[in-house]
Image (cartoon, rainbow, N blue to C red):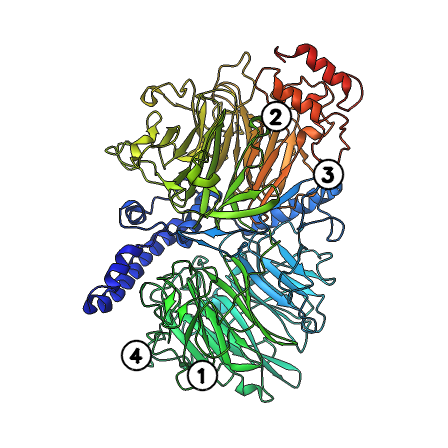
Amino acid sequence: MHLRRRVVVSLAVGAGVLSLAAPASVRAYRVWAEEQRRLRFEDFMQQPGEDVPPQLHAAVEEELFENTYVEREIDDAFSRWMAHKAHWGVPTAEDSAILLDEARAESQRWPHLMPRAPGQAAINKGLGTDANSWVNLGPTDARFQFNGRPYLQVDSGRISGMAVHPKDQNIAYLSTSGGGVWKTFDLLSPDPTWHPVGEMLGNMAVGDMAMDPQNPDTLYLGLGDFVDAVGGQVVKTTNGGGSWEAPVALAGTYPASVGNRAVQALRVRAIKVDPSAPNIILVGTEVGLFRSADSGASFQLVDLPNVGTQVPEQVWTIAYTGQVNGQSRWAISGTNYATPTAASPTASTSLQGDIWVSTDAGQTWTSRLAVNGLPDYDNDAATPTDVGRISLAAGSPPEDPTRTVLYALTSLRSDVSTGAGIWRSTDAGNTWQDVSGGQGDGTPRNMTFLDTSQCVSVNVHNAQAWYNSTIAVDPGDENRVILGGTLCGLRTVNGLADQPTWEVVSHWLPAYSESALTSDGVLPYVHADWHRTLVVRTPTGYMTMVGCDGGLFTSTNVFEPGPINQETVQWRFPNRGLATHLMYNVASGDPATGNQFIAFAGLQDNGTRFRDTEGAPTTFNQVIGGDGIGVAASRVGEDSIYWGSVQYSSTRYCDPDVPANRGCNQGVGGTWRTLVPPTTAASGGCASGDTTTFLTKVMAVNTGNRPAAITGTTYGVFRLIGTPTSTDRRQWQLLGACDYSVAVRALGVSSTVDGLYGIAGSGGRFRVMSGCTLDTPASQCAWTVTNRMGTDLNGSGTIDSNETPTFTSSIDFPPNHTGINPGDMFVVSSAALASVLPPGLGRVYLTTNRGQTWQNISSNLPNVPVNVVRFDPSDDTNQTLFAGTDLGVYRSTNQGATWERYGVGLPLVRVTDMFVGRTGGLLRVATFGRGMWEIYPSATAERGVAGNGDYDRNGQLDFVDLLSTANRLGTTPATAEKPYYDWNQDLVGPVNAVDDDDLAQLLTRYGGRP
């Protein structure tokens, strides 16, 4: 989402009356708009079978495309969540259990292909050397980041939990929302080294993590991110992540007073180990509180008391408040279900908040709302406090635990997008008072004053209170509190004062000095969307840690009194080596065109990242901000153009051949230009009812006589040839007619035939177009709509809707069309969840008659979503396929009759996109939590020695092929450094090696056809 910064700033620097009135009206509009979006979202989430991209963004589109915005992107958590639901569905407890079962089976089936334990292989600092092994490209670093202007920081993926060794603060762990768990032994150093320790968990989406303070090598993970991939289990390690025990599901039944309702958690929001009795574990989830008294071997559901009708609860945070005679005391925050039978609410559902306290180690609890212990803003004891989500933090318990100090960052029940102020308790959570100026109406001492839309209130949620809210207390001084929301962080150093002073300590875009400017100067940078905070005591003082959508940020002087600016408060960003980015798509150069080093990707809330230089092969610079989605690299001859997109089809392009663009990778404004596809007939789009989509796909067209790309809206597909020459959206040519019965979910482009395109559509159907070359007028091109993909399970002779795997995810065409009409043969995939996939259906299908009939070629693939399937362009027999699944990559060499897990060392992680080079020598994938990976298929001997010498697969034996063969003389499948062996340059002889005989054979054929 773009911010209308230009309008806001002009009001702020105008007449005094306007500068005071504008902020309130701007904030009121945004609150209203976000509430409307939230209500539409709640309605949309009640449709679990829907797989059409949600059309909820007319207001967003208006804001994107009017002329008053400045290109400065912020992510859009609501819309992203809806887009994920439309693309992947709403997983159930059954899906979560199947994923873990399949992961366990695959790790036992392919033990030699699993990732090595830390210490057995170089993981972070360099590229691998085994051509049979997957290589993690990162991102592990950034030379710069650009979001409207450049800034010199390094981000990683979203952090969900942090744990630090109580005696050796150099040992620390991070849990992430998609990249598993990471460990360091030098946290206090300027540049810690991180190691992944959960590559084989099977579910790398962690909701929170807790360390046993008495046995710090023992950690508990709560699987299931609060908004992304689900889980609902607790897994345990007793050796610091060296191995993990079997997961334990969080399930239980509420008592008769709540209707004997059975629940099973999917998302873990908080987990704590009892410091006095480490056999006791408390876990907060979206279906209630769970307690273990046997060190996590089993968990029991704990019913919490409510005001009035007894209902289930959601738990957000857990705080330890001390102990008496070895019996620990706790405070927790959460929200109540609307009714005993209400559907399980989402994180953004508007519900009544409460705080509960326990004095018997979490066995029983009392409600603070029930005894009017929460702030009463309307002075009416008969009406409950208007509060929803609450984030709690406690200081170190004193000798008398009834005097433990706690703080709370709150949101409104009546509007979950808006903050409700900051509270404080000085009696272990029993009673609370507002310490923020009355339901958050207070302002920070050093509010931003030029851009009055951001850090001007102690409610730092900026319309996302349901999504980002966290708070922590310095264990050495309960006067010192750190908290954060969407765009800014706050501190106080006098928290126990009657009215503490709150001060802004960070800003999400300090490069915009006018946005981050306060009376103290320009604020320091911390990435937007705070989710976890922690203050730990160290041998030299303290360290404040923030986990957010941009990874980890730390400071050792954030509580120092005085002015706050980039010189006085320093935030470090120890994210180097943390390859935890949530990638949607990958774009790549190709060995066949000599630009194989080029690689970039779209990342959740980490923008579009572009690979830096060959001297820094795992460094990726952010060249576009916001949510990076679709990416593409088109190269024909020596002419190239790159494409990227931000959420909602805000499509960007950059021409690397223009000297001023500096290769599209230098953080210079204006190099990536916006050119969105049209959505109205007047602008060249569909006749009516079309909209842009959040998960915008862009695909390169490299088969014509110049670079080109295609992209999609909800119902239309558009092509742009060459380099755009203006901002006219009609340069995107509508291909064929818009089809309102088959919405666009994914795109496909032939790697060998010009004008052959495909659409993975809604309802299990696809659209195919052939003969639409770059020289063919787009209006003359036409789509063929397929029959439903699926299997005739009931023998009726047709494929019914319940015999169709919906949630289509990809479409691809074979490389060789000898004897095949282009468009007749193609392979497709589905990301359908197991819970909605009837037995007998698969997720990968092949057609040879343009989708009239289908062959299920899923065979022995694991029973998990398939997000992408690709032919190997180098296999002229059309037999070799690659599939990217929720557990990694699989390959078939017999057109899907059987599948094998492919390559060594790829974690059990969701693969979202895939690029296969034309030579078959390079395979790159994007993963949702572990960044980008590559492997070199042609470097193996599995396909024999019958190469034809055509390295670049251009149908001509030319100088490129001669040079590629000469460079590989002496290589074998065992070669451990580049250039690797390539089976296609191994033309003759019984030995798997490129030798003089192969070069001589190629010379005799030079200038001819392979």
Nearer to us in this view, 809 or 360: 809
Q: In the image, 664: left or right of 249?
A: left
Seen as rendered, the residue at the extreme front is 659
The amino acid pointed to by label 3 is: Asp
Residue beneath disc 1: 431
Nearer to us in this view, 809 or 603: 603
Residue beneath disc 4: 378
Q: Quadrant of the C terminus?
A: top right
Q: Reading the chain from its start, which is encountered first: label 2 or label 1?
A: 1
For label 1, the crowd category at 10 Å Cα-Cα, with few meaning under 14, some 14 to 19 and many 20 or more, is: some
Q: Is residue 3 above or below residue 190?
A: above
Find residue 659 and report its horizontal and vertical position in percent.
44, 37
Q: In the image, 55: left or right of 791?
A: left
- The residue tagged with tag 4: helix, strand or loop? loop
Closer to us: mark 4 or mark 3? Answer: 3
- Disc tally is 4
Q: Are marks 2 and 1 in contact (CB under 8 Å)?
A: no
For label 3, the crowd category at 10 Å Cα-Cα, with few meaning under 14, some 14 to 19 and many 20 or more, is: some
Q: Reading the chain from its start, which is encountered first: label 3 or label 1?
A: 3
Q: Give the alpha-carbon distance from disc 2 to disc 4, as whole Å.
A: 71 Å
For label 4, the crowd category at 10 Å Cα-Cα, with few meaning under 14, some 14 to 19 and many 20 or more, is: few
Which disc number belongs to residue 628?
Answer: none
Q: Give the alpha-carbon distance from disc 4 to disc 3, as whole Å.
A: 68 Å
Seen as rendered, the residue at the extreme bottom is 400
The amino acid pointed to by label 4 is: Asp
Find residue 231 and report its horizontal and vertical position in percent.
57, 54
Closer to us: mark 2 or mark 4? Answer: 2
